């Protein structure tokens, strides 16, 4: 699909989607409706950098070879290194999932694998679904016991944020031990907080729980919408959604109700259309093309420039953005200062304390000044275009 950028960039982006589609299609390239032609040297370079920024470079070489395309040097060696890295990460993930699961089960703690820990099994090969960390959910009241159980098998406890505790294995793999699925969005969180109502043991007597397919897909979409609103979510979540919809028996009525409760219906419909356009050859509309351009610009985790464009678009320009930074919503403030959940009347005090931390804390002040700088660099037309897009997405 054309994104309106220079031709070699369009070719590189389109080639990546073609290769991803080929990776996900069991038939040969002809059966998948894909006919590939060699790229120019400049396009090859662009393809490598795009795929690497999206953490998808490990998929390029196998798909190109399957299509009978030779990848020129030095990119063949670079892609091979990304494959080795993906295989190494996959091996670590497999061992870590087993170790964490065994430790939690031995302690009698119910746990829910999230996102990549589940999705990796739906890819043609588990190493194709890379992840830089592992996400596991436990009930909040069992969090202290879960930390103790994991420390007993070598995990080190790190910082705690509003929905998880960071823990690190002996070989450096990050575990995000969630006690909540909250995304600091009231509309999303009121639905995500019901996760255990939509979970059950994998089998009788097991401490390994699984979400219902409808709720798991809802969580994928909710997490995507959160990242989309902070600058972009990359391409991999669209692969996840495409594969999950193809593999799981999702109760559409339940999914529809969940999306409606979270005001995510329009966003989900757009995600489905774009994933089908990319990986199933379905037609793409103008919104799909605009989303595509936004996602490719943002890389795997978005950019600060795009985050600021979205923030300004959602919060009514510079004045609205500044007001929200000075007076954040209560839920966001209470996530930063958990004592407010028990004593909400202290909100004005902690709002002032947050200003003091920003003014006198070196790191907080640096981040804030950088945010102002980026906000002023974002052009008005970019904000207007972003505002129109997120309105159409219902965000």
Image: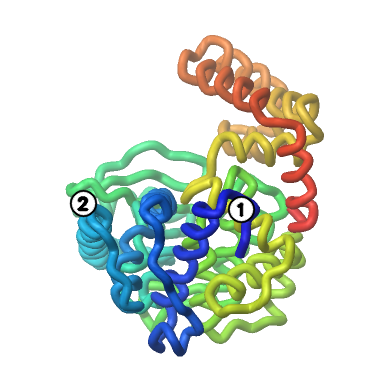
Residue drawn at 47 percent across, 79 percent down = 34
Horizontal side, residue 174 vs residue 329: left or right: left
**How are the colours assigned in the image?**
rainbow
Give the residue furthest to the top: 360
Quarter of the view holding residue 205: bottom left
Residue drawn at 54 percent across, 46 percent down = 298
Q: Nearer the viewer, mark 2 or mark 1?
A: 1
| Neighbour tally class for label 1: few under 14, some 14-19, many 20 plus, Cα within 10 Å | some
Residue drawn at 61 percent across, 21 percent down = 373
Q: Which mark is residue 293?
A: 1
Expressed as whole percent of the image width and height from the top left, the position of residue 303 reads: 54, 39
The residue identified by callout 2 is 152
Q: 58 or 37, which is in the foreground? A: 37
Q: 164 or 365, which is in the foreground? A: 365
Q: Is residue 227 above or below residue 110?
A: above
Horizontal side, residue 42 vs residue 225: left or right: left
Expressed as whole percent of the image width and height from the top left, the position of residue 61 reads: 30, 66
């Amino acid at each position: 699909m054309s994104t309106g950028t220079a031709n070699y960039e369009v070719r590189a982006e389109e080639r990546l989607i073609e290769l991803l589609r080929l990776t996900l299609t069991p038939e040969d390239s002809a059966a998948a409706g894909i006919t590939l032609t060699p790229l120019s040297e400049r396009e090859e370079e662009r393809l490598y950098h795009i795929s690497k920024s999206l953490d998808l470079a490990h998929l390029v070489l196998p798909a190109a070879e399957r299509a009978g395309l030779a990848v020129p040097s030095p990119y063949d060696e670079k892609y091979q290194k990304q494959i080795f890295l993906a295989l190494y990460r996959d091996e670590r993930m497999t061992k870590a999932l087993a170790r964490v699961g065994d430790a939690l089960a031995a302690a009698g703690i119910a746990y829910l694998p999230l996102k990549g820990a589940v999705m990796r099994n739906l890819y043609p090969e588990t190493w194709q679904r890379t992840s830089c960390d592992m996400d596991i959910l436990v009930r909040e009241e069992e969090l202290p016991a879960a930390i103790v159980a994991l420390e007993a098998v070598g995990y080190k406890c790190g910082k705690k944020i509003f929905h998880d505790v960071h823990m690190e294995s002996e070989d450096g793999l990050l575990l995000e031990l969630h006690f909540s699925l909250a995304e600091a969005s009231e509309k999303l969180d009121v639905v995500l907080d019901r996760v255990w109502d939509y979970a059950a043991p994998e089998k009788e007597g097991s401490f390994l729980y699984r979400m219902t397919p409808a709720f798991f897909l809802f969580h994928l979409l909710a997490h995507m919408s959160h990242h989309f609103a902070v600058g972009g979510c990359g391409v991999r979540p669209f692969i996840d959604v495409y594969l999950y919809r193809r593999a799981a028996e999702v109760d559409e009525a339940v999914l529809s109700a969940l999306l409606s409760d979270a005001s995510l219906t329009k966003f989900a419909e757009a995600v489905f259309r774009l994933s089908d356009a990319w990986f199933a050859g379905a037609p793409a509309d103008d919104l799909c093309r605009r989303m595509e351009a936004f996602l490719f610009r943002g890389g795997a985790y978005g950019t600060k420039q795009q985050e600021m464009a979205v923030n300004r678009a959602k919060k009514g320009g510079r004045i609205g953005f500044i007001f929200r930074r000075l007076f954040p919503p209560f839920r966001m403030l209470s996530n930063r200062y958990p004592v407010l959940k028990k004593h909400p009347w202290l909100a004005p005090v902690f709002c002032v304390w947050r200003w003091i931390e920003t003014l006198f804390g070196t790191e907080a002040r640096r981040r804030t000044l950088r945010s102002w700088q980026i906000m002023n660099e974002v052009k008005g037309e970019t904000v207007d275009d972003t505002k129109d897009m997120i309105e159409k997405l219902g965000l």
